[in-house]
Image: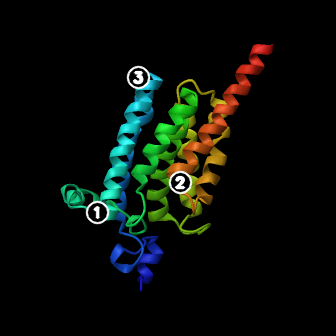
Amino acid sequence: MVSQTQEQQGIKPSAKDGTEFGYDREVWRKLLHLFALSIPIGYQFASQTAAVVIVFICFLGSLAVDIARFRGWPIQRLWNPMVSPIVRPKESQNFTGATFILFSGWLCRLVFTLPAATFGMLVIILGDTSAALIGRRWGRHRTIGNRTMEGSAAFLVAAAIAGICTPGLPLAIGLALAVPAAFVEMFSTRVDDNLSVPLVIGLCSHLALTVMAQTSGTV
């Protein structure tokens, strides 16, 4: 059983205890998660075609790593020492967050405008990192699944910052969509939030930008 001290600290059990790993490994996982910032940053310097192709190749690479892990292929021994410490127990027979976020990064830039794709990716990268680190350490009030009010509040703040920092995105849209972004993340219990948040928020901001452009064009 998880000790009362661990529960009071908001630290989930390690993989050996059943479902999660410790906070130190969570920190390491989220620091690596921040490398995904290269996706929305890269959007700003590459053409749409180049960005779509590059991210799709990266997605295929991550997908191959996951499949090799599922199948137990010998080649996985090359990267297993680096991958296994940050793979959640629930991901042992499922795709990792890296694969989901690369797929989102590819699809967002493929179908959304540049500001919308950028915003969708910044929200999940900054928001998920903030929610996990704050929620795991200081979360006390449970909401849905393993979510906490403190973690969701951290996600909301990070999403608002993403809205402020997204080039070409009106501030009103960025701040307004921070709230639904936090709710999408909170309710993403059956669908990986690395997939649901970028696509939903990217779509919402894409539609908002389209309506704004059409409205201004008719004035």
Q: Amino acid at mark 3?
A: Phe
Q: Residues within 10 Å of mark 3 (few under 14, many from 20)?
A: few
Rendered image quadrant of residue 164: top right
Q: Residue, x 31% and y 61% (percent of image)?
A: 69
| Pointer 1 local density, CA inside 10 Å: few below 14, some 14–19, many at least 20 | few
Q: Are marks 2 and 1 in contact (CB under 8 Å)?
A: no
The C terminus sits in image quarter: top right
Mark 3, residue position: 45
Residue 54 showing in the rendered view: yes
Q: Report x, y in % for residue 30.
A: 38, 53
Q: CA distance from mark 3 to mark 1?
A: 33 Å
Please say if 97 is above or below 4: above
Q: Earlier in the sequence, mark 3 or mark 2?
A: 3
Question: Which residue is the extreme one toward the bottom?
Answer: 1
Q: Which mark is residue 193?
A: 2
Relative depth, front residue between 153 and 197? 197
Dot 1 corresponds to which residue?
84
Q: Secondary structure at mark 2?
A: helix
Disc nearer the start of the sequence (2/1): 1
Which residue is at 50% across, 50% downward? Answer: 194
At 49% from the left edge and 43% from the top edge, which residue is drawn? Answer: 104
> Contact, CB < 8 Å: mark 3 with mark 1?
no
Q: Secondary structure at mark 1?
A: helix
Q: Position of residue 159 (x, y in %)?
A: 56, 43
Q: Position of residue 86 (x, y in %)?
A: 32, 60
Question: Relative to residue 49, is residue 85 depicted above or below?
Answer: below
Q: Is residue 158 left or right of residue 208?
A: left
Task: Specify the quadrant of the image occupied by residue 204.
Answer: top right
